[in-house]
Structures are given as structure tokens and as C-alpha cells.
Amino acid sequence: MRERGNFYHDTYEAYFFMNGEKNLIKLHLDFMDFRLLMSNYGLNPTETIYKYVAESLQIEAFKEGLKTEVHRFAFYNDALFTLYFYNDGNQIYRITSDSVNLVDNGTDGVLFLKDAVTEPFLVHKPEDDLSLFDDYIISKMHFDKEILNEAEYKIVLSLWFYSLFFGSIMRTKPILALIGPKKSGKTSALAKIGVLLMGENFEVTPLSSDEKDFDAAITNQYFVAIDNADSAIKWFNNKLAIAATGGSIKKRELHTTNKLVEFPIKSYLAITSNSPKFRRDDVAERLLILKLERINKVISENKLRENILKNRENILSEIIYHHLPEIIKALKENPVSFDVGSFRMADFADFSLRVARYANIESTVKKILSKLSKQQSHFTLEYDTTFELLLEWLKKNHNREVRSVELHHELSDLASEKQIDFFYKDKCRAFAQHLRNIISNLSEFIKVEERMASGRKRLYRFAQKDDGENNV
């Protein structure tokens, strides 16, 4: 095998790179390219020796192979201001601010692993920038303009989409959440983005009650679209928080009894929902919440997919030759990180503001980020009875200082009086913790002060905001 290529490894996996084919193969029993490689030597997965050969090759890769970083989809080298975009045909589009070149996988030491779903593509240099991505995807969406206007929504969605190509400089990745009623185009929007990037084999994934299905998706695919996330599934909030912060999933390795392996999460996650249950405060602050409204004229899913597939290479050509070089130029001319204020997803905010400064829309994007923070807080508190009761309590207790135990007692009484189902009615300690968790969300809508008094007592003061203070 050494005559045909080279062994590599990263922290978790072993690989073999075929020099002639420029194909990187994961040395794992369940990886199809590995099975094909073994078949060239007359080895079949059903044979006992197959497993031992696989383990021997893995050991060889870790002992004698070069340690490297293996990529999926795209990799941005911020030291060289160079983006590498894999076409899943063992070739890479190497993109700078002033050039686009098609090179072999492995060029500049950059190695990509083939995705089982993605269809290879080839692009051409378009004569004109026709805004095809906007025409086929963004402009087809019907946004609910309650907090953001249509132009602001389009800016957010565009920045999120282009951030997909720069995930290597964003450890934390915002989760795109499309929220809206049935027939609002949520599923179609994500399907079109997935088909554009991955090809006709891409499908949105219904939310499964099985945690293992979710883990498999976010550790094996670069872009995952979870559809109809409306069920209250116990583990879902925790997994969303881990996925957004670039954590890892511990799983028992297949074909072993007790070996736990860490799988890093490098995927971008998007969700659709009609009645979301993932409103926990630490999850909401990691969401890019785009609200959609019902569409009167619905086009069939097959027709929408067909339109994207027919124009896939034209749209990608425009993105690769016109848009990505401009973003690289923006990052190159604005290398210093920005003060992103209170927006929690700092990596995305920093990327957005660097691009915005180059495009002369920095103040607009800052305003959008502020509105998104308010959208996140609204999302968290929308069905929170603590917030509902606190607003009612404030009518007679404006600017009054109170301990959490007193507040809990008074809100519980108020809940009984108003016949409101208050989850924390008999849970004083849990209420105190919940109150601390949502303080930043509450401060978007009311004035909040807290201080520590003697005896480690935490005191709160709440007051209504003036009308002007509620404007974003």
C-alpha cells in the first residue's frame, strides 16, 4: 500500500491517501471507500481476517503516518487568506481574494474526506454576477416582519450561508432556526440550501426520538437540517447547546464492547419548527431565529428541488467566482476582531461585522445583531409563565427591591389568583436558579438590577422600561 499512497492520522481516526486518485480513505470498517480498497486485495468484510487487517492498518497509520487535520466541505486558512472548497470529486477550488484555481485534493497539505451524500460538481467563470443565490433561495422566502424587516432577514440569512465556508475560524456556530406555521416554506428553504451544496441526494432529517440518530448526523455531515422539531424530547436541548459550541459526542465504537470514542462536532445545524420546545435560555441565545409566514401559493417540493439541481453549478459558479473572493477580501482588510456587544455567538458576530465593514453596512449589521438578541430573549420568554407573572406583578411593585424567595411566594400567590399554571409554584430553589438564568433575557424588556446583600442574600429590583428604551 505504501507504493500507492501515504498513511495519515488525526486525533481520532486513521487514513490512507491514494496518490494517484487523490482520494483520502478513512481506515474504518464501515467506510465504503475502505471496503472498496480492501476488495482490491481480495478481502471481504464477512471474513474474520478483515477486522484484523483493518486494525493493523489503523495502528500503522497512527505509528508511522503523518498527523494532519482532515476537512469536510471547506477549510479557510486565515494566515494565508485562502479558502479551500472541496468539490467531492477529489479536487479543490482554491480561492483567494483575486484568484480561483482547481487543484488536486492534498494540495498545500490540505486533505478532504469525501462525503457519502454529496455529488461532485464543476464550475465555470460566469460572465456576470446575476444574484442567482438570492433569486433561487433567499428571495423566495416569506419572512414574518415582527422584529426584523425583510432586508434585515436577507442580510442575516446571507451572512449565515457564507459563514458555512468559514467554519474553520468559528469554533462556535449559530444554529439557524426557521420558525413558522405549516406551509410557510421552512422545509423547502433548508432543502434547497442542502441540494445546492450537496446535490440531489440531500434530504432534510425528521427529528428522531433516538439520540443516536441525531449524534450520527451531526458527527458525519457538514450541514444537517432537522425538520419539524416540535416534540419535547428530553435530550434535544442539551445536544443543541453542545452542537453550537463545537463540543464532541462520546459514542461506543462499533464492533467493540466497551471502547468509547470522542467524535468532534464540526457540522452546521439548521432546524425547522412550528411549535418549538427548544426554548431553554442557553439554547435560544445560540439560535439565529428567522420567522416565516404562511405562503398562499405553494410550489411542489419536487419542482423546487428540480430548479436548484438544474441551476446548481451556475449558482455555485457565481458563489465561487464572485462572492467568496469578496468575503476573503473583507476578512483580509479587516483582520482585527470586533466588539460584538451582548450577542452571544461571538464568532459569527465577528465574521459578520468584518464582512459588513467591507460592504459599508457595519451600523446596519450591528442593529440587526441587537434585534436578534431581542428575538432570542422573546423566544425564550414567549411561553414562560415566570415572565408573564412578573409583568403582572410589576404593575403594583415598580422599582421595588425583593429577595427571590419573596418574589417566588408572591408570584405563586398571583398565579393562584389568576388561575395560571406556574411550574415553579412549589419549587423555590428551582425558581431562584431559573430567575438567574433568564435575567439577561428579562433585561431586554424590563429594567433589572441585582445585588448581593449581607448573608449572601441576592436582591432584585425590577422596573418598567420607558417606551424609548424598548426600541431596538
Image (cartoon, grey):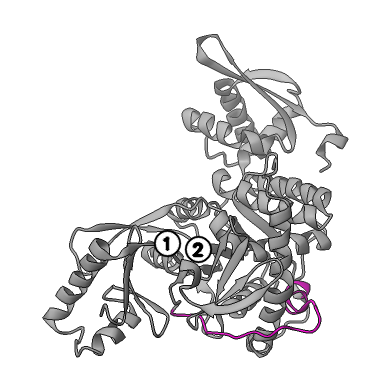
Question: Which residue is drawn at the image coordinates 84% and 55% (left, top)?
Answer: 360
Q: Residue furthest right?
A: 468
Magenta residues, start to end: 116-139
Choose the circle earlier in sequence order: 1 or 2: 1
Residue type at numbered disc 1: Glu
Label 1 with label 2: CB-CB less than 8 Å? no
User: Looking at the image, which is closer to me, 19 or 28?
Assistant: 19
Question: Where does residue 136 sit, x and y in percent of width and height?
Answer: 74, 79
Q: Where the C terminus falls, by quadrant?
A: top right
Question: Is residue 291 in view?
Answer: no
Q: Residues within 10 Å of mark 1 (few under 14, many from 20)?
A: few
Q: Residue extending furthest left?
A: 48
Q: Is residue 256 above or below residue 284?
A: below
Question: Circle 1 sits in a helix, a strand or a loop, which is it?
Answer: loop
Between 123 and 241, the one nearer to me in the picture? 123
Residue in the image at 69% along x and 87% along y: 311
Give the residue number, with chain letter if any, for mark 1.
69
Quadrant location, the N terminus: bottom left
Q: Amino acid at mark 2?
A: Ser
Q: Which residue is identified by label 2?
A: 267
- How dense is the environment of label 2, judged by Cα within 10 Å: few (below 14), some, or many (20 and up)? many
- Quarter of the image for residue 197 reads bottom right
Answer with left or right where residue 367 lies relative to residue 38.
Answer: right
215, 158: nearer the viewer:
158
Q: Would you say the magenta stretch is mainly helix, strand or loop?
A: loop
Q: In front: mark 1 or mark 2? A: 1
* Residue 270 on the magenta segment: no
